[in-house]
Image (cartoon, helix red, strand yellow):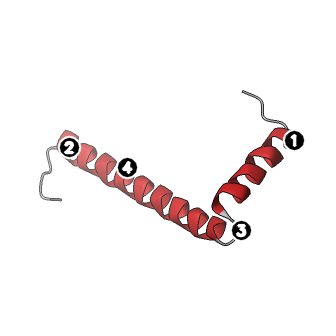
């Protein structure tokens, strides 16, 4: 899927109209926090799998 600049501007314009200019930074912070939490969970799950593969279950 190829999004050009006009399509992206249209999408951002609709978002700005829908949520308002003051709400967009709050939404961006919330999305950033969600991404950080997701990455942290993935990293912890990977460490848990590695511990199980190595037979070391003391990390829990």
Q: Quadrant of the N terminus?
A: top right
Instruction: Pick whichever of labels 1 and 3 is earlier in the sequence.
Output: 1
Q: Which residue is mark 1?
A: 6
Which quarter of the figure has residue 4? top right
Which quarter of the figure has residue 7? top right
Outermost residue to the top: 1
At 72% across and 57% down in the image, what residue appears?
A: 17
Query: Do labels 2 and 1 touch, CB within 8 Å?
Result: no
Instruction: Pick whichever of labels 2 and 4 is earlier in the sequence.
Output: 4
From mark 4 to mark 3, how far is it between C-alphas? 33 Å
From mark 1 to mark 3, how far is it between C-alphas? 20 Å
Q: Which residue is mark 2?
A: 54
Q: Which residue is mark 3?
A: 21
Question: Where's residue 10, x and y in %?
Answer: 80, 45
At 54% across and 62% down in the image, what residue appears?
A: 32
Q: Which residue is mark 4?
A: 42
At 72% across and 58% down in the image, what residue appears?
A: 16
Q: Quadrant of the C terminus?
A: bottom left
Instruction: Pick whichever of labels 4 and 1 is earlier in the sequence.
Output: 1
């Amino acid at each position: 899927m190829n999004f050009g600049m006009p399509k992206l501007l249209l999408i951002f314009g609709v978002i700005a109209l829908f949520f308002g200019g003051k709400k967009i930074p709050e939404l961006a912070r919330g999305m950033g926090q969600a991404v950080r939490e997701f990455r942290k969970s993935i990293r912890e799950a990977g460490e848990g799998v590695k511990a199980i593969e190595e037979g070391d279950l003391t990390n829990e």
